[in-house]
Structures are given as structure tokens and as C-alpha cells.
Image (spheres, rainbow, N blue to C red):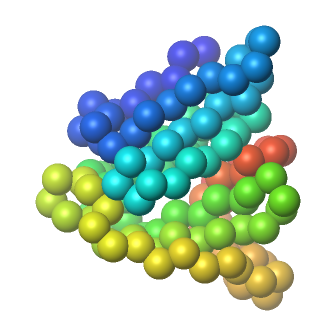
Amino acid sequence: MAILIDKRIQKFVEGYLHGENDEIISIYLKDINETFWFDSKLAAQNFLNKQAVERVGNSELRKNSFCYKNPEGEIHRYLITVNKKGQIVFYLEEVIDEEEIEFWEKEKVYIAEAIGKVTS
């Protein structure tokens, strides 16, 4: 399975495969200077799909945020402001506690996980 990047956000994304069997994938978002790590192509693809929705997708589908679970198990929520070109011009990163995690899971908010399954 190849990883596809929406051409409208491609200028903000760099991706790399790591390891002998390409088992680790990193995605670097240039506009916020952050790297996100994934253990499967599916998880990386879902993350990129979420980026496309939040940056250039239908405004009714946007939540103006995305979540990411780091390798230590902490869930970070990024509250974002995007310009007309799809660039994140402002963001606020916060670590979500357990009560907030339950709330967001009930709301079925996408959380990209660095290690393990991806929920949507």
C-alpha cells in the first residue's frame, strides 16, 4: 500500500520510511515544525487524510483540531487555525487528560496513534 498525500497539502508535508522493512513512518509538518511517528502505513494515511480535511476540506467537516497519541501514550490535541491556502498559521498544543479522552472518544474524534490501532 502506497501512502498518498493530497496535492493541496503536499507542500506542508514531508514523510520518511525508517527501518529495514519500512516499519516506522515519520511525517513532518513543515508549517508547525512537528514530526509525528506511526507504525503502519494505514495509521500514517489516516493522519494525512485528517490533515487534508482540516486544511482544505469542506468547512462543515472541519473540527479545527486534530489529535495524536505519542509513543509514550500521551494524547496531544492540536487546536489549529488555517489560512485559505491550507497552511496552519496558529496552533495550540495541549495534553488531554483521561476525562477529556473519554469525551473525545464518545464524540468519535480521530486520534492518530503512534503505536497501536487508529480510531476514527
Seen from the viewer's position, the closer of residues 63 and 31 is: 31
Task: Identify whether 91 is placed above or below 86.
Answer: below
Question: Which of the image's four quarters has the N terminus?
Answer: top right
> Exactly how many numbered labels are in the figure?
0
Q: Residue at x 51, y 54 (%)?
A: 34
Please tell me which residue lies in front, 90 or 46.
90
- Residue at x-position 17% and y-position 53%: 85
User: As displayed, is residue 63 above or below residue 84?
Assistant: below
Visible residue check, residue 107: no
Percent of width and height locating residue 8: 24, 39
Given the current orientation, which residue lies at the most extreme front position? 33
Image position, residue 95 (x, y; %): 68, 78
Q: Quadrant of residue 24?
A: top right
Question: Residue pushed farthest left?
Answer: 84
Percent position of residue 37, x then y: 67, 43
Name the quadrant of the C terminus: bottom right
Locate residue 38: give its quadrant. Answer: top right
Give the side of residue 37 with respect to residue 85, left or right.
Answer: right
**Residue 40 image offset from top left, x and y in percent:** 72, 31
Residue sitting at 52 percent across and 24 percent down?
3
Viewer can see residue 64: yes
Q: For this rendering, which residue is in front, 23 or 35?
A: 35
Q: Is residue 28 left or right of residue 70?
A: left
In-image side of 33 versus 107 (left or right): left
